[in-house]
Amino acid sequence: MCGAPARAESASTTCDKVASPQGSDSAPGTVAAPLRTVQALANALSPGQVGCLRAGNYEGGLRVNHGGTSEAPLVLRSYPGERAQVTGRLYVPHGSDYVTIADLKLDGSHQPNEGVLPSPTVDASHTTFEADDVTNEHTAICFDLGNPDYGMAESVAILANDIHDCGVMPANNHEHGIYVADAINTRIIGNVIAHNADRGIQLYPYSEGAVIEDNAIVENGEGIIFSGAEGVASDNNIVEHNLVADSLVRHDIESWYPEGNPIGTGNIAQENCVSGAHESPNIATEEGFKAANNVTAAPSEIVATESGYGVAPGSVCAGVVPQLVLGVKGQEAPSGGGPAGGKESGGGSAPPVSPPGSPPTSPPSRHWQWHAFSVQAQIPTAHASQAKRRHSRRKAHAKRSRAAAHRRHRSHGASTHKPPAKRR
């Protein structure tokens, strides 16, 4: 069921360890004697245990230094009936697998010791984010999944979160809500992804087997991109039953591949509702993906409510994303021009590499009700093995590129090569 973030159900949660802003990191972590920091709480958990944060703000961020198992994940969440905020960078490194982060406010904008890096960053496997409020307050990318040097992100699930106000302003084509960089079997389901500087979701350069469905991806610079670089491309990704609307810089769904790079295969964008792209058509090109049975709504058919976004009763998108109709009666639609409703979308021209303009200041984040579901791995084992081989090749390619840049620097003195921004 498409929806958007709400508080994950926690009334029946059993808390094995507890932290509180009034606690002490020398305490045992009980309700009566809680720990003080989120880092101490995470460090104290064993596989299968749940760590709960009492209401309040926890500064300093979090590096998850160990994980759980498939039968006994490690869980961090708000205390039942309360809502906690973690301020600073959240990093799940390679090897810290089977970790769940639920029902928290995650603000990655305060990182005084290292500059502002993407947050949450995930280089581990089987990491789940559920019903969290995620932002960087327009200071950096938010979700950053995988890196050829630090680890592939495998089977990450991003479920029913509010992901908003990510990326520095003005828009520069590099600052996204969810950056799927080196990942297989990603699940992005039931989220509100809104008011991010550039793309709501970027599949670049290597996403294999992602399923992106039942999301509201609204008022970002662009909506979703299929892409590739460095000799790899994103393949076998499914984008369906999403509301992708009101992109403020460029297109709702698009693709881009550098000259000479492999083009993505097996990608499909189907049965989505698109509306009001800054540039027409809403779906810019089908290079590297197939567009099928997508429907374009008029701007008047997209409504903003106190709880999220949806389509008005009677919209041409009601049959495409009918679950989005719930809860929108009596709400006014946003103003603005856009394409006429009722047509299927697909085709068009490739986007420019660097877009002009920037999104306006965004309103406060919003929350929808969400229906829980289980996430099943759908990527075939053969595809997963192939993906890991590609990851190894990409890692070797990145190492060679750095070595070549170093040689150029030594040969020519002052080099024009600019290394990528520090991400870890």
Image (cartoon, rainbow, N blue to C red):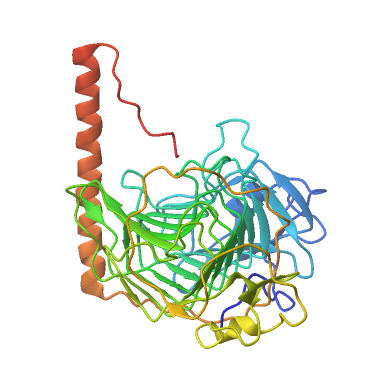
Instruction: Point out the image quarter for the C terminus.
Output: top left
Percent position of residue 13, x then y: 69, 74
Residue 36 in sight in this render: no
Percent position of residue 141, x then y: 52, 46
Residue 268 in sight in this render: yes
Residue 53 lies in what quarter of the image?
bottom right
Percent position of residue 146, x then y: 39, 52
Q: Is residue 359 above or below residue 272?
A: above
Q: Is residue 271 above or below residue 129?
A: below
| Residue occupying the point 50% across, 50% down | 198
| Residue occupying the point 21% across, 29% down | 403
Q: Is residue 282 above or below residue 182?
A: below
Instruction: Point out the image quarter for the N terminus.
Output: bottom right
Total numbered circles: 0
Q: Nearer the viewer, residue 336 or 20?
A: 336
| Residue occupying the point 76% across, 69% down | 306
Q: Is residue 264 left or right of residue 100?
A: left
Percent position of residue 292, x then y: 35, 79
Q: Is residue 195 left or right of residue 212?
A: right
